[in-house]
């Protein structure tokens, strides 16, 4: 076993400079994001389940409008930590918290969905080598996150062969762009303004630019 | 379903009462995962129906969940399953069974819908058994011991779990603090609605990130990540756990095999009628 390399992290100016170990601070941040979003989803799902039951069969379709909100945690984690696999990791941790500690009804298959979702959300950021955080990157992140996981969900829930297949896809993609992409940028920018993330890669990059 | 949140003061070392609660958490999670994965490829109603009845019996006998809790925990799964059944019955082409205006139910849709609904119920009843019989802390410790989950990750998640337990209270505090300071609406009540929830959620996020940073520092200053590491309370992995795994996998194989032999089993192609 090799000793952890965390001690040296303060010497490194940017996140892209260190590729080896995750620092414990980044690790805990991603877990915290997973916990907070897991908790907020949990509140949200309770309200939502009640609503979708009252809406009957329309509820199944209507909940696609909110699909994008499940993607949020990945772009936020990537933007703050700015290292490879942050998005996938954040999604999987959030799903573990939902399943293990909050008892989500999807069961452990949620881990798989989360990993696919995270990968989709992460691709646009990875293509810019974790340097570009414009509205467009976030929007693409939401689009791909929703797009990739759609085919998995479609298989799992048997949407293939339904007459509303394309409608489902369209709603989910739009929701992904707005709730899973652009909303994430709003949240990240607001967080950055409060100063709580100054000690993470996002804050260091801002200082380096200033 | 909320038992994990409420059950804060249950000591992790308390000897579990039910047979299922004494089993190794990693083995239980792995079995749940395997069964869910296999079911993903089953699209006929008979196979999951048999599995559901078996799983229901097994969980009822081994997990000793009070009947009321067991029934209540079923509600979200039942609602979801019902939704699947209705949507598929209405939205699939095939032999029309019943028609009224634009609404029509097809045989194919009904069959696929029933298959998906029953699959949800199988995974649901197993998840109920898992969640209500497994302590989160024991699971993480067991994953560390038996599934080679790194110690830093394990303890980061456990710290996150502690934080999760405090979140409902934090949420309450923030909501109350906002309500106290917010300008009242004309009829004298504090403002409610999506915007207020958003504000509270953001405050919760900021607060938690700050807390997480302190948590990471204190974990690090106490030497987390140093090797070799010892574990305070070890989670046992016994022969009985392997026996349970063998029993579950055998049952799964036999049911799917029999179903295939008798011609009930349908795969993904059932969707493309």
Image (cartoon, coloured by chain):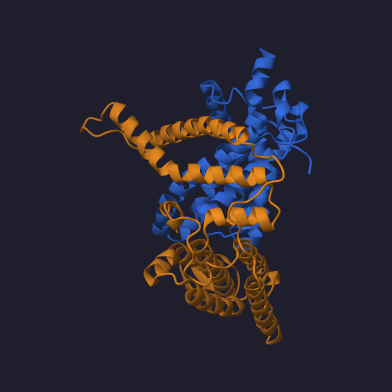
* Chain A shade in the render: blue
Residue that lies at the very extreme toward the left in this rendered image = B187
Task: Residue A83 in the image: state x and y as whole percent.
Answer: 71, 33
Q: Residue at x 52, y 29 (%)?
A: B210
The number of discs equals 0
Q: Is residue B55 above or below residue B28?
A: below
> Could you tell me residue B202's position as x and y percent?
47, 32
Q: Is residue B242 above or below residue B255?
A: above
The quadrant in which residue A10 appears is top right
- Residue at the spot 39% in from the left edge and 72% down from the top edge: B67
Residue B11 in picture, x, y percent from top left: 46, 55
Q: Quadrant of the C terminus of chain B?
A: bottom right
Q: Is residue A139 visible?
A: no
Q: Where is residue A56 shown, x and y percent of the image?
A: 43, 60
Looking at the image, residue B213 sits to the left or right of residue A13; the answer is left
Q: Residue furthest bottom?
A: B262
Please indicate whether residue B183 sits to the left or right of residue B30 in the image: left
Placement of B2 over or under A72, stated as above or below:
below
Q: Quadrant of residue A140?
A: top right
Vertical order, A35 against A155 (above or below): above
Image quadrant where one finds the N terminus of chain B? bottom left
Q: Is residue A56 left or right of residue B251?
A: left
Q: Colour of chain B?
A: orange
Res B166 seen here = yes
């Amino acid at each position: 076993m090799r000793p952890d390399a965390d001690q040296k992290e303060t010497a490194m100016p940017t996140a892209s400079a260190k590729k080896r170990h995750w620092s414990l601070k980044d690790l805990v941040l991603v877990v915290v994001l997973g916990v907070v979003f897991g908790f907020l989803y949990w509140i949200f799902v309770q309200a939502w389940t009640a609503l979708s039951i009252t809406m009957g069969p329309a509820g199944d379709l209507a909940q696609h409008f909110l699909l994008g909100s499940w993607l949020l945690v990945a772009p936020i984690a990537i933007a703050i930590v700015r290292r490879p696999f942050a998005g996938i990791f954040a999604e999987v941790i959030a799903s573990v918290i939902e399943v293990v500690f909050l008892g989500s009804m999807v069961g452990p298959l949620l881990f798989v969905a989360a990993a696919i979702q995270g990968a989709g959300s992460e691709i646009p950021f990875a293509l810019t080598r974790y340097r570009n955080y414009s509205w467009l990157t976030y929007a693409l992140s939401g689009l791909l996150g929703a797009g990739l996981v759609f085919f998995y969900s479609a298989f799992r829930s048997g949407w293939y062969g339904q007459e509303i297949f394309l409608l489902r896809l369209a709603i989910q993609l739009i929701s992904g762009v707005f709730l899973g992409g652009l909303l994430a940028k709003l949240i990240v920018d607001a967080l950055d303004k409060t100063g709580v993330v100054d000690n993470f890669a996002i804050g260091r990059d801002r200082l380096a630019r200033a | 379903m909320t038992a994990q949140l409420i059950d804060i003061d249950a000591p992790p070392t308390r000897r579990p009462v039910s047979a299922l609660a004494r089993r190794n958490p990693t083995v239980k999670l792995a079995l749940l995962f395997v069964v869910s994965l296999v079911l993903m490829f089953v699209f006929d109603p008979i196979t999951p129906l048999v599995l559901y009845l078996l799983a229901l019996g097994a969980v009822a006998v081994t997990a000793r969940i009070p009947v009321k809790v067991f029934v209540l925990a079923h509600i979200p799964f039942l609602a979801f399953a019902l939704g699947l059944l209705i949507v598929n019955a209405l939205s699939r082409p095939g032999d029309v069974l019943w028609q009224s205006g634009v609404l029509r139910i097809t045989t194919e849709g009904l069959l696929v819908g029933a298959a998906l609904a029953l699959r949800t119920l199988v995974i649901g009843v197993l998840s109920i058994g898992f969640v209500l019989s497994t302590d989160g802390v024991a699971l993480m410790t067991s994953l560390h011991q038996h599934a080679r989950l790194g110690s830093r990750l394990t303890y980061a998640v456990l710290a996150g779990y502690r934080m999760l337990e405090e979140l409902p209270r934090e949420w309450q505090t923030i909501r109350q603090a906002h309500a106290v300071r917010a300008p009242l609406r004309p009829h004298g009540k504090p403002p409610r609605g999506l915007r207020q929830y958003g504000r509270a959620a953001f405050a919760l996020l900021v607060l938690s990130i700050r807390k997480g940073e302190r948590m990471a520092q204190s974990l690090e200053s106490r030497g987390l990540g140093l090797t070799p590491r010892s574990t305070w309370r070890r989670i046992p992995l016994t022969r009985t756990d392997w026996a349970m795994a063998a029993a579950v996998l055998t049952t799964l194989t036999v049911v799917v095999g029999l179903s295939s032999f008798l011609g009930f089993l349908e795969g993904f192609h059932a969707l493309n009628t």
